[in-house]
Image: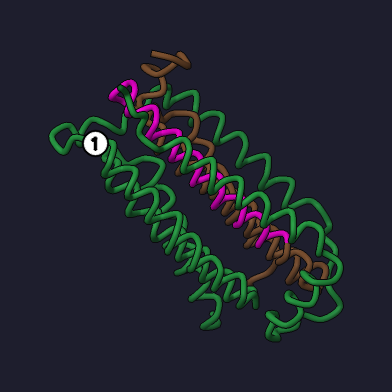
């Protein structure tokens, strides 16, 4: 077996293991910290796929932003004493059936579809190309994205402030 | 056997399935948001894998960056709503907080 194959399976094991911990853990603190492994594993997969810029963005935004936000929310909404029972899960058997069916069908589709193949697989820095595309073909979505972020920023501030009662 | 497109697609499908399970079973609003993040990550792996193996250009990665941006906005607003619910109901169990007002 090649070294790259071994490393891929290691990264995939870390990613899937952490994601399973997020889905099945009974303690929400463990769930939140396992999310770190899942996000970092996905970032490592991006590196393997030659997407250096997306990997950096994943680390910056998911690990540095969203994960910290989730941890803050967990800490702010929990009384430490009842931390053991707060991550309740109901209807696990039907959910397992639904999940199993979905994943089975997806894997069957993935195996049987003749996917289009690129002529050659290139490993090259992508940052400059992405920057060019953002300012040429994808200029309108790029500007819309800034509007969405502004709206989300204001919305989050308005929603989470404390109401002053006279 | 070298690592190809199908490996990454299967990995994305597994992440999607685990996120779906999390969304379906959890009664804690923050855990549901974590499941949504897993689903978005699974979709992103598919985007980047197709961009690498199928199309050969970087447009798929642009969509992945847009998805990451929207996930950040969704997490910020979603967690703000969770905090607001917690201030009103003193719980974030989605079954206890099923009305819009106190």
Q: Which residue is drawn at the image coordinates 17% and 31% (left, top)? A: A82
Looking at the picture, the colour scheme in use is: by chain
SS at mark 1? loop
The chain drawn brown is chain what? B
Please report the bounds of the magenta region as a residue range.
B63-91
Determine if the magenta segment contains residue B33.
Answer: no
Q: Position of residue A39 (x, y in %)?
A: 47, 60
**Chain to which mark 1 belongs:** A
Residue A1 or B87: which is nearer the viewer? B87
Determine if the magenta segment contains residue B78.
Answer: yes
Q: Position of residue A12 (x, y in %)?
A: 49, 63
Assign the N terminus of chain B to one quadrant of the image: bottom right
Side of A12 relative to A132 (left or right)? left
Residue B39 or A72: which is nearer the viewer? A72
The chain drawn green is chain what? A
Q: Residue furthest bottom?
A: A124
Q: Which residue is drawn at the image coordinates 57% and 75% (left, top)? A: A47
For residue A59, above or below residue A18: below
Would residue B2 be visible to someone looking at this image?
Answer: no
Q: Which residue is mark 1?
A: A78
For residue B2, above or below residue A111: below
Would residue B99 be visible to someone looking at this image?
Answer: yes
Q: Position of residue A95 (x, y in %)?
A: 49, 28
Residue A33 lies in quadrant: bottom left
């Amino acid at each position: 077996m090649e070294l790259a194959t071994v490393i891929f399976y290691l990264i995939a094991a870390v990613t899937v293991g952490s994601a399973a911990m997020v889905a099945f853990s009974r303690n929400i603190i463990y769930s939140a910290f396992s999310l770190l492994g899942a996000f970092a594993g996905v970032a490592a997969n991006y590196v393997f796929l030659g997407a250096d810029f997306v990997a950096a963005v994943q680390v910056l935004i998911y690990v540095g932003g969203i994960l910290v936000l989730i941890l803050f929310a967990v800490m702010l909404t929990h009384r430490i004493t009842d931390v053991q029972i707060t991550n309740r899960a109901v209807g696990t058997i039907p959910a397992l059936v639904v999940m199993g069916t979905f994943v089975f069908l997806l894997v069957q589709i993935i195996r049987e579809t003749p996917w289009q193949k690129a002529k050659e697989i290139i490993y090259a820095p992508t940052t400059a190309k992405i920057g060019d595309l953002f300012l040429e073909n994808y200029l309108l979505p790029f500007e819309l994205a800034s509007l969405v972020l502004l709206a989300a920023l204001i919305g989050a501030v308005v929603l989470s402030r404390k109401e002053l009662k006279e | 056997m070298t690592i190809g497109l199908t490996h990454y697609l299967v990995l994305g499908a597994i992440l999607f399935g685990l996120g779906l399970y999390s969304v379906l079973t959890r009664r804690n609003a923050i855990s549901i948001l974590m499941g949504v993040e897993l689903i978005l990550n699974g979709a992103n792996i598919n985007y980047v894998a197709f961009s690498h193996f199928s199309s050969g250009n970087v447009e798929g990665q642009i969509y992945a960056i847009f998805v990451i941006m929207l996930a950040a906005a969704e997490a910020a607003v979603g967690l703000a709503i969770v905090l607001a619910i917690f201030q009103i109901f003193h719980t974030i169990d989605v079954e206890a907080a099923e009305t819009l007002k106190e």
